[in-house]
Image (tube, rainbow, N blue to C red):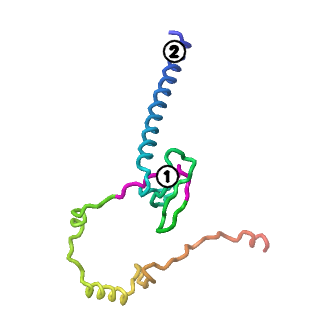
């Protein structure tokens, strides 16, 4: 088989594969944009690309050149570029059963908690070398640095 013909066949296959993948990617992007447009209604919980959370006040899904208005605190409304605003990710709701499994001990009363904190305050923490630690932070010692011999002194003498 001629190498030029083989190269041409490989080239045509690669071009076909790129065309097929780009159509699939564009379809997914269009579907995601339509879903975003459906969910972007006033009152929706949103997040900016920089991580700022808020509530959507105004958003024009037909004209993205108009700024979106987001309320980040009661009475504080900011204007942002429409493409910066996106639906906030869902918060994970923990199961009550999972929390119940984590708690194996009986609840500590206020008196026991106060007594434990007094005992911890009275007894200073002690490091491995026997010296007390200040606020639970061990004393830092500087490393010893060998600067070498003073070679210049031998030549001057």
In this rendering, is residue 8 above or below 120?
above
Q: Quadrant of residue 28?
A: top left
Q: Secondary structure at mark 1?
A: loop
- In the visual, does 8 lie left or right of 129? right
Residue ID for mark 1:
59
Q: What is the x, y in percent for residue 60?
A: 50, 49
Q: Is residue 105 magenta?
A: no
Disc number for residue 73: none
- In the visual, does 100 lie left or right of 93? left
Determine the residue located farthest toward the right in the rendered image: 156
Residue at image position (46%, 60%) is: 53
Residue at image position (49%, 31%) is: 22
Q: Secondary structure at mark 2?
A: helix
The boundaries of the magenta stretch are 79-91
**For the residues carrying marks 1 and 2, which lies nearer the camera in this image?**
1
- Is residue 59 or residue 18 the one in the foreground? 59
Residue at image position (51%, 44%) is: 62
Q: What is the x, y in percent for residue 25?
A: 46, 35
In this rendering, is residue 24 above or below 105?
above
- Is residue 13 or residue 147 the one in the foreground? 13
Label whose residue precedes the other's in the sequence (1 or 2): 2
Q: What is the x, y in percent for residue 144?
A: 57, 73
Residue ID for mark 2:
6
């Amino acid at each position: 088989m001629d190498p030029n013909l083989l190269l041409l066949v490989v080239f045509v296959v690669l071009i076909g594969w790129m065309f097929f993948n780009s159509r699939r990617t564009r379809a997914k992007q269009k579907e995601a944009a339509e879903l975003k447009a459906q969910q972007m209604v006033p009152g929706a919980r949103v997040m900016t690309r920089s991580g700022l959370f808020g509530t959507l006040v105004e958003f024009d899904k037909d004209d993205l050149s108009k700024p979106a208005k987001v309320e980040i605190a009661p009475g504080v409304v900011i204007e942002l570029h429409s493409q910066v605003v996106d639906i906030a990710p869902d918060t994970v709701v923990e199961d009550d059963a999972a929390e119940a499994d984590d708690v194996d001990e009986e609840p500590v009363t206020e008196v026991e908690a106060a007594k434990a904190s007094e005992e911890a305050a009275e007894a200073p923490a002690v490091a491995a070398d026997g010296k007390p630690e200040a606020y639970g932070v061990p004393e830092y010692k500087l490393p010893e640095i060998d600067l070498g011999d003073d070679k210049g002194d031998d030549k001057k003498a």
